[in-house]
Image: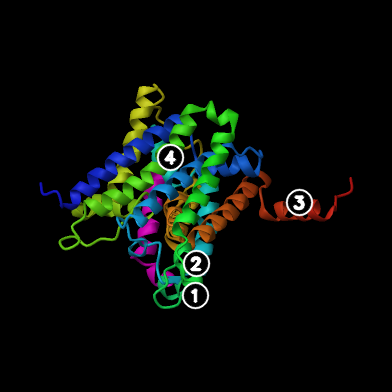
Amino acid sequence: MDVSSPWWTALAGLAVGGVVGFAVFRARLCTFGALEDAMVGHDWRRMKVFALALGLAVLGTQALAMAGILAPDRTNYVTTALPWLGILTGGVLFGLGMALVGTCAFGSLVRLGSGDLRSLVVLLVFGAVAYATLRGIFAGIRVDGLERVALLLPAGTASDLPSIMGRLTGHDFRGILTAVAGVALVAPAFADRRLRRAGRLMTAGVMLGLGVVAGWLATTWLVDEFAHPTPPQSLTFVSPVARALFGVLFEPTSLAEFGAGSVFGVALGAFAAARLADEFRWEAFDDPREMKRHLLGAVLMGAGGILCGGCTIGQGLTAGSLFALSWPLAVAGMAVGARLGIALLMEGSLTGFVRQSVAGRFGFHNKP
């Protein structure tokens, strides 16, 4: 097989996804779980692990950019227009769906690898809705509706922070920005004594961050720009899940890409970790109510993930590693959606949560 064949990038995705899935399963690391810990339990340890992953991804990705190996403006995250309304709306929908399911798309792949059949149903629905939003029946609403509301950047300016700072000042601050952001993100995890003793959590954070860098490398070095021109990509689990589902059902050759390979890799890596720890267990829905909640969450995540351009990994780490302007908008939307979803699950309704929040904010309390 020719080294420029797209199947090599698929194999690279399989390998990177496998390592990440293995490490994350062993650490019990989950983006929604980290958000829930921080928002409800005020425990920021797992959020520090994701900050560690983001810091390493930033340092590695920007090093590739400064070395001329990776061109950020060739990726799908750094464009000349920022569809801010779609990103914010999609982020909220994704976060809400994530809360209803109890994990994100990446977490669903990890759970599937450990024998959770609920995640199989979630991923099938999630992938179908994502594909319908990407190229199917809902694509028109996305393209002609939400994505028309966009911030157009000046000609020659890409939607990443170093490019904008360079445009405004006439100087290249990429190196300084990378060093400051990288250290600021990595330091909290290493400064936390409890985390330093949690080897599996720290390892999972390191593997996630390095996995993002490995994705950029693989899709830069192993792609023949003349035979198979594709933009560089790295870890993300929305459109790759949709394309993997399409490839399995209709067009096997579409599986020859990094994203599809990483989808299968994460599930296989989690499967290997579960078997090694003797923790592989078949699980299914407890009742129809739980199934309905998961199905609704899968629909919201599928549509929302395409609108905001990625999942908690795709936007939270991969877009963040590029300093893309979509990153803070998507992450903020996901955090808001997740908090609303947690409130919905805990309070039974959003009105109760809003009422309680207003009362707490202004000191109003119901009389007995």
Q: Secondary structure at mark 4?
A: helix
Residue 214 at x, y percent in the picture: 32, 45
Q: CA distance from mark 3 to mark 1?
A: 34 Å
Whether residue 153 is visible: yes
Residue that sits furthest to the front in the current view: 171
Q: CA distance from mark 4 to mark 1?
A: 36 Å
What is the span of residues highlighted in magenta in the rendered image?
117-142
Q: Point out the frontmost of discs 2 and 1.
A: 2
Q: Residue at coordinates 57% horizontally, 50% vertically from top-left? A: 338
Say which mark, if any, is on residue 118.
4
**Among numbered discs 2 and 4, the one appearing first in the sequence:** 4
| Amino acid type for the residue under numbered disc 3 | Gln
Residue 30 at x, y percent in the picture: 49, 39
Q: Secondary structure at mark 1?
A: loop
For residue 81, which quarter of the picture? bottom left
Q: Which residue is mark 2?
A: 165
Decide: marks 2, 1 in contact (CB < 8 A)? Answer: no
Of 121 and 8, nearer the camera is 8
* Quadrant the C terminus occupies: top right
Main secondary structure along the magenta-highlighted residues? helix
**Among numbered discs 4 and 1, the one appearing first in the sequence:** 4
Q: Residue at coordinates 33% horizontally, 54% vertically from top-left? A: 67
Q: Secondary structure at mark 2?
A: helix
Q: Which residue is mark 3?
A: 356
| Amino acid type for the residue under numbered disc 1 | Val
Q: CA distance from mark 4 to mark 3?
A: 33 Å
Residue 54 at x, y percent in the picture: 47, 47
Q: Which residue is mark 1?
A: 149
Q: Residue at coordinates 66% horizontally, 42% vertically from top-left? A: 40
**Among numbered discs 2 and 1, the one appearing first in the sequence:** 1
